[in-house]
Image: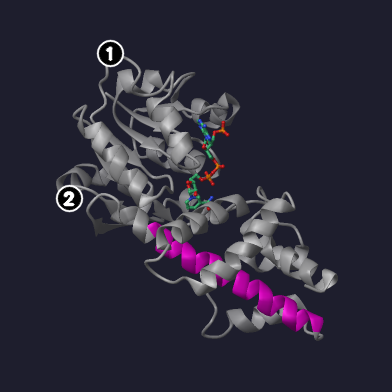
Amino acid sequence: MKTGFAGTGIMGSAMAVNVLKSGFDLMVYNRTREKTSELEKMGAVIVNDASRLGEACNTIILMLTGPKACDDVLFGNDGILKSNNISVDCIINMSTVTPEYAVETARKLEEKNIGYIDCPVSGSKGPATEGTLILLAGGAANLISRHERLLLSMGKRIINCGETGRGSVMKLGVNLLLGNMMASLSEAVNFSEKFGIKNSLFMETILSGPLGCALFALKSSMFESGEFPPQFPLKHIHKDMGFALEMSQNKVSLPCAESTFNLYTRGLNFDMGDEDFASVIKIIQNRDLNGK
Ligand code: NAP
């Protein structure tokens, strides 16, 4: 039996390499086949439609944009569950989705005797490449422990968050903090620069004190160059904060997120969705230019 992997975008391509390097017999599907060529050279079997994964693999990892992409790949016309001859017994969904989606999908899969691990990740392209992601797992503990070796081929630690859906709650909580931190850093960099402090000196100061963290260190060169190649695309932080804001309606107040979400929405309107989310600094600079 092979292990399946669907979705070789920024994260999935690096994660699948680590699964392969750990000795798993890997079968890979990506909607855009060209993005699988490196994995093919390394020995993965590449398939043109996801239903082939469902027929040949027992465990399948999903690393896709969000709920719609997961539905297409699982339940679509050429999806994993299309065949009458399905071998899959566990889906590990590492995409960032809503907790509600995780619970509902687990329910649909249970009807077919297929287990579901709700396992989004914390960490971006660097940790995905190094195999040091933090894996935020929700679901049956025995199912998670049965897949521990596979999971740890992609990450350095599994955090057991509880029942199905809690992995996704944890992920959205982490990304609320992430989205706010990035907007807040951008605001402080821009403020200092406007009043005569170079962004490189400001970042050096932050990174040498108690506010220094790996995230800020990673983005420092982007502020300096003004180039924002995507590690974590702006469209994804917008998606994830949007999920959290939708869930929060009348239940919990998210005053910081409400404000920073508007900045990321402007970013999308300016066609910056595929840039790294650190490009939110350009939105703040643009507000200065327009006086609002
Ligand atoms: P990405 O580069 O945009 O890749 C998205 C993947 O989803 C691609 O393989 C894409 O296929 C596939 N896809 C999208 N819509 C599809 C559809 N309708 N049918 C089939 N396949 C579809 O995104 P990423 O950065 O790797 O992120 C993947 C997931 O991880 C997202 O949920 C994101 O929020 C989460 N995440 C990202 C980061 C990060 O730093 N980038 C960190 C943690 C978590 P194509 O290649 O054909 O477009």
Amino acid type of the residue tagged 2 in the rendering:
Ala
**Which one is in front, 145 or 93?**
93
Q: Is residue 179 left or right of residue 195?
A: left
x and y, in percent, of residue 185 in the image: 62, 74
Q: Would residue 26 appear left or right of 110 to someone viewing this image?
A: right
Which residue is under mark 2?
A: 141
Q: Secondary structure at mark 1?
A: loop
Is 209 left or right of 200, judged from the image as shown?
A: left
Colouring:
one colour
Magenta segment: does it hold 153? no
* N-terminal label among 2 and 1: 1
Q: Which residue is mark 1?
A: 84
Q: Is residue 102 above or below residue 286?
A: above
Camera-near label (2 vs 1) is 1
x then y, percent, for residue 292 = 77, 72
At 66% across and 47% down in the image, what residue appears?
Answer: 274
Say which residue appears at 36% left-offset and 29% top-offset. 4
From the viewer's side, name the closer residue of 72 and 178.
72
For disc 2, does the CB lie below 8 Å from ligand 1? no
Q: Compared with residue 15, is residue 57 higher up or lower down, i.e. above or below?
A: above
* Main secondary structure found in the magenta portion: helix
Q: Nearer the viewer, residue 280 or 220?
A: 280
Please, what is the three-letter code of the amino acid marked with disc 1?
Answer: Asn
Asked whether the viewer can see residue 61, the reply is yes
Give how far apart the Cα atoms at labels 2 and 1 are.
29 Å
Residue depicted at x 75% and y 64% = 282
Q: Quadrant of the N terminus?
A: top left
Q: Position of residue 54 (x, y in %)?
A: 33, 22
Disc 1 crowd rating (10 Å Cα; few below 14, some 14-19, many 20+) is: few
* Residue that protrudes farthest toward the left in the picture: 142
Q: Which residues are magenta?
A: 171-194
Residue closer to the observer: 16 or 103: 103
